[in-house]
Image (cartoon, rainbow, N blue to C red):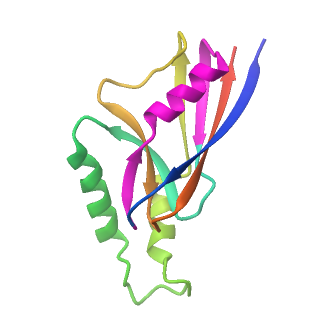
Amino acid sequence: MKTFSMETFSIATSSRCELVEITGRVAAVVEACGASDGIAVIYIPHTTAAVTINENADPSVARDIVMKTSKLAERRDRDYTHGEGNSDAHVKASMLGSSETVIIEEGRLRLGTWQGIFLAEFDGPRNRRVWVKVISG
């Protein structure tokens, strides 16, 4: 029998562009749901933030992602037509995406040795919501 559970938590970001590791928060949701096997879908309901899975052992990787996305979608590009001044954040969020899916096995997230789950902030600082849908069974 499949069971479904959804939890939401908030993250306060502190910079305009940053990656905030949320692996522990997602793992806590999975544990609280009591899922032994299934999947967790991590979704960011914002258009200027994203979620990504990448290396969490070396913090320079997260800094490199912020640096490179900022070069690919420059904040002050004069070709943007969106009038709010955050077009670069929309582009960066679209490049990384709004969701990730992680396998749950024996009650734990099945991430690689060096992998972590990150909220990618591109228009902060802000308070962001993270939705986690656990499907077990």
Give residue 39's position: percent from left, percent from top.
60, 25
Q: Does residue 136 show up magenta in the picture?
A: no
Is 105 situated left or right of 120 in this image? right
Is 29 situated left or right of 16 in this image? right
Q: How many numbered badges does the structure rendering display?
A: 0
Give residue 40's position: percent from left, percent from top.
59, 29
Q: Farthest residue in the right direction?
A: 1
Residue in view at x 21 percent, y 40 percent: 58
What is the span of residues highlighted in magenta in the rendered image? 16-42
Is 61 situated left or right of 86 in this image? left
Q: In which quarter of the image is the C terminus?
A: top right
**Where on the picture, by quarter, is residue 134?**
top right
Residue in view at x 24 percent, y 45 percent: 59
Q: Quadrant of the N terminus?
A: top right
Give residue 82's position: percent from left, percent from top.
56, 84
Residue in view at x 53 percent, y 87 percent: 81
Residue in view at x 40 percent, y 90 percent: 78
Give residue 92's position: percent from left, percent from top.
44, 64
Residue 31, placed above or below residue 66: above
Is 11 situated left or right of 70 in this image? right
**Where on the picture, by quarter, is residue 88?**
bottom left
Residue 21, placed above or below residue 87: above
Q: Farthest residue in the bottom direction?
A: 78
